[in-house]
Amino acid sequence: MSRLRVDVWRGRADGRYQRFEVPREESQTVLDVVTYIQRHLEPTLAYRFACRVGMCGSCAMTVNGVARWTCRTHVAKVASDDRLEIGPLRNLPVIRDLATDMREFFDKWARAKGQFAPTATRRDDPARVAPESRSRAAADAGIECIGCGVCYASCDVVAWNPDYLGPAALNRAWTLVNDVRDAARAERLRAVSGDAGCHSCHTHLACTERCPKQLSPTASIAGLKRATALALLKGEL
Ligand code: SF4
Ligand code: SF4
Ligand code: FES
């Protein structure tokens, strides 16, 4: 049976890689490899996953230098010469081994006003939003985000400026800016127009290239740049 040589990050930011040998299986995912190591070779290995089907967003790691969702990444696609290097996501503090602290990632969603602000009460009829409307199409384009952090870990501007809100929070803000049922448009545009907001994006496209859900945070950020500039011209910011 062929085997994989797997270097796995151990410890915190000042840790090191530890090598393991894992049997190669058909249709094996990177998450399967990490789980094999934790169950058979090193029970203290820390990592995170929940759904194993690409829905929860909790299994993202750096695989051979690239941020990926590991439950949907097949070893055959990424292993070169039967070797894998698996580390924690970049741009986030390491708790231990492959588990990163996601608090600042989600705190930035809050800073970007990523929460829906309802205009209706439970006594009102459900809102009717025309599926073919431009705003609905724009909201739809970014709504399938699973909060995996792959885009955030791939963004150089986050690495240079840890205050930058980042692609996921800005994508979420754009989704809500286009939600006609939401009441906080002006407040949200104000929240994303500051120094650490949408205008800091350098349009590198790394987030869009890496997003496992094929979303385009870059396009969402471009939308926010236009909307904030327009709001400024109208004296709304
Ligand atoms: S397009 Fe903007 S948000 Fe996306 S990776 Fe590049 S700088 Fe970061
Ligand atoms: S935009 Fe894509 S890469 Fe970024 S958190 Fe959402 S699903 Fe993950
Ligand atoms: S384990 Fe849920 S997305 Fe991978």
Image (spheres, rainbow, N blue to C red):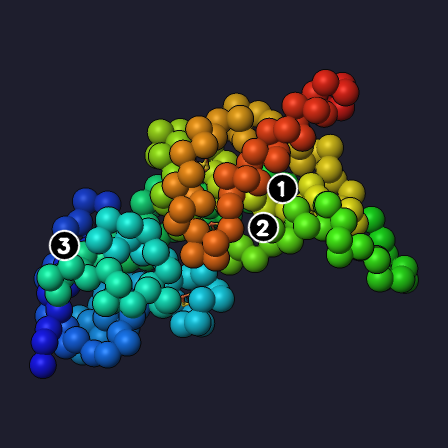
Instruction: Give the residue at x 42% y 43%.
Output: 207
Q: Position of residue 231 (x, y in %)?
A: 72, 25
Q: Check disc 2 and give the amino acid type.
A: Gly
Residue at numbered disc 3: 17
Label 2 sits on a secondary structure element that is helix
**Cβ atoms under marks 2 and 1 closer than 8 Å:** yes
Label 1 sits on a secondary structure element that is helix
Asked if 78 appears above or below 217 in the picture, the reply is below
Rendered-image quadrant of the N terminus = bottom left
User: From mark 2 to mark 1, how far is it between C-alphas?
Assistant: 8 Å
Asked if 177 appears above or below 190 in the picture, the reply is below
Residue at numbered disc 2: 142
User: From mark 2 to mark 3, how far is it between C-alphas?
Assistant: 36 Å
Quadrant of the image occupied by residue 60:
bottom left
Q: Is residue 161 left or right of residue 133?
A: left
- Of the image marks 2 and 1, the number of the one nearer the N terminus: 2
Residue at numbered disc 1: 174
Quadrant of the image occupied by residue 81:
bottom left
Query: Within 10 Å of the Cα at label 2, are there few (<14), some (14-19), or many (20+) other Cα atoms?
Result: many
Q: Residue furthest bottom?
A: 1
- Of the image marks 3 and 1, the number of the one nearer the N terminus: 3
Instruction: Give the residue at x 66% y 46%.
Output: 138
